[in-house]
Image (tube, rainbow, N blue to C red):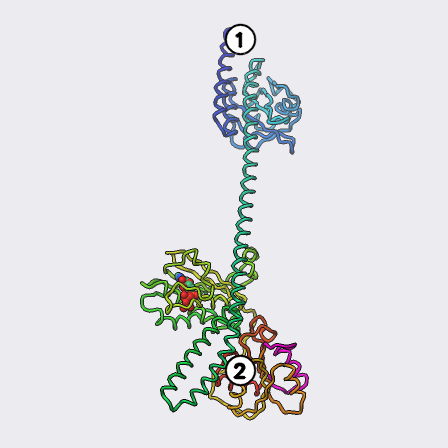
Amino acid sequence: MIEPAAALQNLLRQQAAIARFGSFALRERDLMAILTEAARVCAEGLGARHSKVCQYRAEQNDLLIVAGFGWRDGVIGHVVSRADMSSPQGRAFSTGEPSICNDLGKDAGFDLPAFYAAHGIVSTIDVIIKGADDQPYGILEIDSDTQHDYDQYDINFLTGFANILAEAVSTASRGAALQVSVDRMKALVEEKDRLLYEKNAADQQLRQAQKMEAIGQLTGGVAHDLNNILTVITGTIEILSEAVAGRPELAAIAQMMDEAASRGGDLTQRLLAFARKQPLQPSEVDVNSLVMETAKLLRPTLGEHVEVHMKLAGDTSHALIDPSQLNNAILNLALNARDAMPDGGKLTIETSNVVLDDGYASIHGDVVAGNYVMLTVTDSGHGIPADILEHVFEPFFTTKDVDKGSGLGLSMVYGFVKQSNGHIKIYSEAGHGTTVRIYLPQAIGAVSAAEVASIPAIEGGRETILVVEDDHLVRTFVMGQIRSLGYTALAAVNAAEALAVIDSPQPIDLLFTDMIMPGAMNGRQLADAALQRRAALKVLFTSGYSQEAIIHHGHLDAGVLLLAKPYRKPELARMLRAALAA
Ligand SMILES: Nc1ncnc2c1ncn2[C@@H]1O[C@H](COP(=O)(O)OP(=O)(O)OP(=O)(O)O)[C@@H](O)[C@H]1O
Ligand SMILES: [Mg+2]
């Protein structure tokens, strides 16, 4: 029995230890550190060399040693005991009462793990640690390698610690719960931001696409009519030129008119390209070779002070694209780059295969997910400020002097890429250069367009040609040209008239028809009807642009001959012969 004075001393020491530990637990945020420190101080306070904290695991219904003092490796975090009467800690946990075992060897009811014997544990005392809610957290146990007579003071001492631990456990679990809800809230906010961003991006893309669509329709309409007018002008100038050949001053004027008309023709072609209405001849194109060829052409144009770099991926697939238009697009981009680097700089052309996935397609409404060849043109020039960037694809938008730029370069590239089922993206910032990425659909299998022969000398013929054209001016002019080539020309204003001629006994070798005509039938339908009546009849279509069946999405159907307006006599002559020989 301890002396009362000594017992009092002991009690005071224990009280002081609990108080010290309490203030430690208040400062410390790491629960494991608190549990470990409690185990250490308690063992010291009770003169033992080992102690542990076991956490109850409801799913397994067991007690796992999560912290402790004095043990060899392999105990903490590993050893479990059943949360029932078969172990000292299980007994305290099940009954909720402190459990004292002064001599483990005598208590035959326990089924103790081997490490007790390995550490020479002889006596134990256990108290329960309450938890955040109804479920207790676990057990605090002191293990001694000597027999002990634990008394009520010892139990009070341990319970003091266990109460502080219970407080720490519930604070920690509140903290964890709080953290979980904070994390969840953060995730929700992020998700909301992401959706908002995607929606904004999609909205902006949509507005931009609608704007471009509207401009495209307007441009296409104007270009179409202009084309018809130019067809007449270019043709009649030729007649004029021949007539005034002997009068130099008039010949010079005719020459000027011709040049003006051909510039007009150029302009309409570019407008049609923007409006996605140019007849394209897509074929399977080796983009790398085309880029290298184009780069050779570029060298002299760019000048000495522009360095050209190429990074062409060896495995770049072939693209299904009109090669001459792609060539044209690269030239336009390179010229823009040159203009942006008046003091010299670096132009980089890259190719590679890329996949545009569903995610990308969902933001860019006009993109079909799939495999593309990406062609990237980058310059180190002055870049484009944001307020200008949104306009660069618009026709006639330019920041260059009147005689330096028409503002049609990027419009053409845009129209061509879109018409080719591709995708285009421009990245630029003022002062940081510009990157234009063009995504071209990869070619799958060989879809090669008919080779277009080079233009031979003008060749006429004696066959009979039925011309169907609603525009009076154009018709008159074309008839004249066809006759001047030696052919017999018959005229029809529309499909109905044409069919009347076809139904007559009149011999006809070739139907030469416009695509877009007023009345019930367009050129394609007229041709179909005509072929039903005269299977041997040859057909040649003409159009400024062709939206109908003949040009499926702007692409010529294989085997269909189309003469694009405006055309010159040699082209007309060549196409007439080609159609008659078909
Ligand atoms: N690489 C670039 N660096 C800086 N600005 C550019 C670049 N490419 C285009 N731009 C800007 O976009 C505008 C429109 O370009 P676009 O090619 O359509 O027309 P342009 O070059 O002005 O005239 P055009 O090509 O018809 O001769 C340019 O005037 C310029 O302001
Ligand atoms: Mg340009």
SS at badge 2: helix
What's the distance in space between the residues labelled 2 and 1, CA to CA? Answer: 129 Å
Q: Which of 454 and 409 is in front in this view?
A: 409
Q: Residue 2 carries which label?
A: 1
Disc 2: residue Cβ within 8 A of ligand 1's nearest atom: no
Q: Is residue 533 magenta?
A: yes
Q: In this view, does 407 lie to the left or right of 201?
A: left
Q: Where is residue 81 in the image (x, y as percent from the top left)?
A: 62, 29
Q: Residue 151 carries which label?
A: none
Disc 1 marks a residue whose amino acid type is Ile
How many neighbours does mark 1 have within 10 angstroms: few (below 14), some (14-19), or many (20 or more)? few
Q: Residue at x 61, y 20 (%)?
A: 105
The residue where tag 2 is placed is: 473
Q: Give the range drawn in magenta.
A: 516-539
Q: Where is residue 15 in the image (x, y as percent from the top left)?
A: 51, 15
Q: Where is residue 229 in the image (x, y as percent from the top left)?
A: 50, 78
Q: Is residue 412 magenta?
A: no
How many marks do you count on the picture? 2
Q: In this view, does 198 lie above or below 554?
A: above
Q: Quadrant of the C terminus?
A: bottom right
Check whether the beta carbons of the residues at disc 2 and disc 1 lie within 8 A of each other. Answer: no
> Could you tell which of marks 2 and 1 lies nearer the N-terminus?
1
How many neighbours does mark 2 have within 10 angstroms: few (below 14), some (14-19), or many (20 or more)? some
Q: In which quarter of the image is residue 330?
A: bottom left
Answer whether residue 466 is visible to the viewer in this image. yes
Disc 2 marks a residue whose amino acid type is Leu
Answer whether residue 311 is visible to the viewer in this image. no
